[in-house]
Image: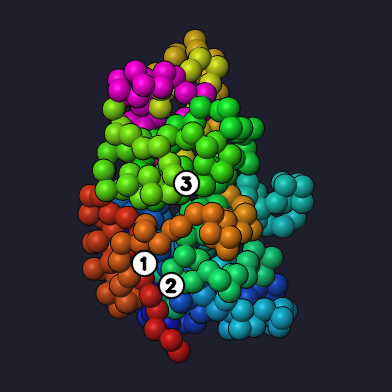
Amino acid sequence: MQAVTFHAGTVRLETRPDPIPGPGEVRIRVRMAGICNTDLELLKGYMGFSGIPGHEFVGVVDAAPDHPELLGRRVTSEINLGCGACPTCLTSGPRHCPNRTTLGIAGKDGAFAEFLTVPASLVHAIPDAVPDAAAVCIEPLAAALEPGQQLHLTAATSLLVLGDGTLGILGACGLRMLCPDVVLAGRHETKRAIAAAQGVAVRPADRDALRREYGPFDVVVEATGRPDGLAFALDLVRPEGTVVLKTTTFAPTPVNMARVVVDEISLVGSRCGDFKLAAAYLRDGLVDVSPLIQAVFPFAAFPEALAAATRPGAMKVLVEFGEE
């Protein structure tokens, strides 16, 4: 198979053997995959990554020795592969298994390849009404919706989402179902317009202007993708409020923790989310992801796709694999 690999900041197109599914696994022929900010951080050196990246994808099951009912199904997969035997896996699932690997991020080859293998237990069928390009967004949409599963958000909660990248826009549009007055603040007028078209109040990422208009917020979701995002969020949350952290960067995040102590602010890490919930949002048209898709490149043009994804202000860039 053809695969893209990252090694020490370099990108290569390699030929590798087709993977063979192990016990309980399925093999998926990838149809489309998305480049996200985490992939760009991996290329910079985040997690010391070396291998095949990519974790946002849709494909078709083409080998399933232990699960023939999945053959031919259009699917995506969760990204955390637990050991299945530790207390964490047995009680709360694989997301925080101490021995886990993570698809395309840590210890498990990902979706920038013609084939990948994953445990059948992590596979989710794609609703017929959801096209491939939208299905690629199930993973980031699930992550964007996760604060609504972690916190008790209500219509009375004053909620700010910081960052108008894909994750921030998806978060604001999705969490609007819980907090109708959610505000999205970002640096790019054209990006903010995507959320505004779906009923979200949008503002420039101006700290003083936001405080003048709204005062401090109950909850701030930090999705800037920037090392200084946490400090910015702390300036905009009320005492005893909550900052939800979505950003992961190779660069360290500087912050004065004394203000967290003095104002008794809760910091909540938020990573992955519920794929079933995200697929239902797309199936029912609760969030429109199509305006987020900037370009689709053939897989053979991956270097061009990566260049497009790294340009300032870029939105979601997809790569498409040819049919067998």
Position in image of residue 137 (x %, y %): 47, 60
Q: Residue 173 carries which label?
A: 3
Which one is in front in this view, the residue at disc 1 or the one at disc 3?
A: 3
Q: Residue at 48%, 76% (x, y): give it.
A: 30
Q: Residue at 57%, 56% (x, y): give it.
A: 281
Amino acid type shown at disc 2: Met
Amino acid type shown at disc 1: Leu
Q: Give the range drawn in magenta.
A: 207-232
Q: Which mark is residue 318?
A: 1
Q: In this view, does 218 lie above or below 262?
A: below
Asked if the stretch drawn in magenta spans residue 216, the answer is yes
The residue singled out by tag 2 in the image is 32
Q: What's the distance in space between the residues labelled 1 and 3, CA to CA?
A: 21 Å
* Disc on the earlier residue, 2 or 3: 2
Position in image of residue 272 (x %, y %): 55, 49
In which image quadrant can residue 77 be found?
bottom right
Q: Residues within 10 Å of mark 1 (few under 14, many from 20)?
A: many
Q: Quadrant of the N terminus?
A: bottom left
* Disc on the earlier residue, 1 or 3: 3
Position in image of residue 47 (x %, y %): 43, 49
Q: Are marks 1 and 3 in contact (CB under 8 Å)?
A: no
Q: Do the residues labelled 2 and 1 touch (CB within 8 Å)?
A: yes
In this orientation, does residue 102 appear?
Answer: no
Q: Is mark 3 on a helix, strand or loop?
A: helix
